[in-house]
Image (tube, helix red, strand yellow):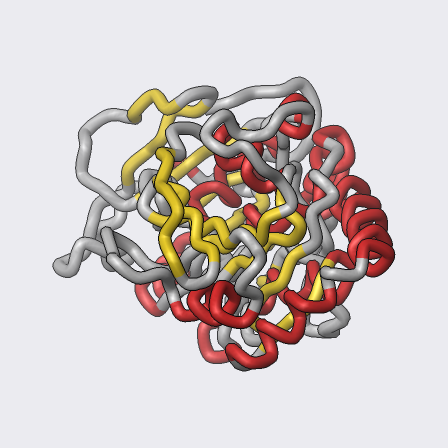
């Protein structure tokens, strides 16, 4: 449990807190940290341990589990004393099991959800928190995020490469593969003089003219940042649906993005001025060819960096937005 001097208490009820590979874990942990700057934060997760578990700045409480390992039924949940009467509740994903718990245990509390609440599961006093700017009237207050990057990554290219200005492709696949993902295959076939760098399974492979030219390891986040910072454009084939973290990091380095049109968060970043969207492989190739124009790339680089830095570059702005959103009266 993290404590501060002022502010309403906040209760974080998270299905994915302990699953760091999931984007929702990254988002809910960031939000909990920001909320703790203004008030007391309690974190509750599914599970059976008898005592809270220390996890960074927080003592994570467990509320029991249901038969399927999800949230327990309201009758057996062990969390009633953990939700102060004046607390604001934030959940990462609202599903039927958690909806039943909220209806019984959090009646009268203001509830915010990070994932979009279906109308049939919406709590009586609930709304969505907006992580990515959107024109949708159904969204709640914008809190954004703080997405940090290391500026030193832009001062020197990755040691494994002797070139820059490549097309960087972030794969949407897992495991080892002999051939590149479809998007990269189209790019190296259609732009046969370009270096296409594919990041997949903690490795970066270089393709040129449909031929594999080399493979290096990507051992750290800084390695990835170096690859992003020195690319002509970053093509994210599988961006996260809540924040599209790698897209934001790319924009903060001034590297434009090309993302699938149906990826909501990434497409919003592109529309905001940082890149282009595609809906087919032929469209992806067309978008990539536009970056042969240095003036076009420079324009998107500047507008994308301005957008990303103003929305995701300031930790104090993020803390203030979270405070104002969660302190609002129902």
Q: Residue at x 62, y 63 (%)?
A: 258
Of the pair 170 and 99, the residue shown nearer to us: 170
- Establish if 17 lies above or below 232: above
Q: Nearer the viewer, residue 160 or 60?
A: 160
Quadrant location, the N terminus: top left
Q: Is residue 327 visible?
A: no
Percent across and percent down for residue 228 are 59, 41
Q: Is residue 47 left or right of residue 61?
A: left
Q: Is residue 171 left or right of residue 168?
A: left
Picture quarter with the C terminus: bottom right
The number of callouts visible is 0
In the image, 251 versus 25, the foreground residue is: 251
Q: Position of residue 147 (x, y in %)?
A: 63, 38
> Who's the residue at 84% across and 47% down the image?
302
Q: Is residue 45 visible?
A: yes
Residue 175: x and y, percent? 24, 52
139 horizontally vs 311: left or right? left
Quarter of the view holding residue 309: top right
Q: Residue at x 30, y 26 (%)?
A: 52
Residue under the image location 32 percent in, 39 percent down: 18
Q: Position of residue 284 (x, y in %)?
A: 58, 73
Is 44 drawn above or below residue 241 in the view shown? above
**Whether residue 52 is situated above or below residue 230 in the rendered picture:** above
Q: Is residue 216 above or below residue 138?
A: above
Comparing 187 with 211, the one in front is 211
């Amino acid at each position: 449990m993290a404590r501060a001097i002022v502010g309403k208490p906040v209760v974080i009820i998270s299905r994915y807190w302990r699953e760091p590979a999931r984007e929702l874990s990254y988002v809910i942990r960031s939000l909990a940290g920001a909320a703790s700057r203004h008030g007391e934060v309690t974190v509750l997760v599914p599970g059976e341990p008898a005592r809270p578990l220390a996890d960074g700045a927080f003592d994570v409480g467990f509320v029991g589990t249901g038969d399927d390992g999800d949230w327990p039924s309201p009758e057996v949940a062990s969390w009633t004393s953990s939700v102060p009467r004046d607390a604001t509740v934030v959940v990462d994903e609202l599903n039927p099991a958690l909806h039943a718990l909220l209806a019984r245990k959090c009646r009268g509390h203001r509830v915010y959800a990070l994932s979009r609440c279906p109308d049939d599961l919406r709590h009586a006093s609930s709304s969505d928190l907006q992580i990515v700017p959107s024109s949708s009237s159904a969204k709640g207050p914008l809190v954004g995020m703080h997405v940090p990057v290391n500026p030193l990554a832009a001062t020197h290219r990755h040691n494994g490469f002797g070139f820059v200005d490549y097309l960087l492709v972030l794969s949407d696949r897992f495991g080892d593969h002999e051939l590149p993902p479809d998007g990269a295959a189209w790019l190296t076939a259609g732009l046969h003089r370009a270096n296409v760098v594919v990041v997949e399974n903690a490795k970066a492979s270089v393709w040129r003219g449909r031929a594999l030219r080399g493979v290096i390891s990507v051992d750290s986040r800084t390695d990835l940042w170096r690859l992003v910072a020195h690319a002509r454009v970053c093509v994210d084939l599988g961006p996260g649906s809540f924040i599209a973290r790698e897209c934001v990091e790319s924009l903060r380095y001034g590297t434009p993005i090309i993302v699938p049109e149906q990826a909501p968060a990434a497409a919003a970043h592109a529309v905001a001025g940082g890149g282009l969207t595609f809906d087919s492989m032929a469209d992806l190739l067309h978008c990539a060819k536009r970056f042969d124009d240095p003036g076009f790339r420079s324009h998107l680089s500047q507008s994308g960096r301005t957008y990303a830095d103003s929305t995701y570059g300031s930790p104090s702005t993020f803390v203030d937005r979270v405070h104002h959103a969660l302190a609002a009266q129902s």
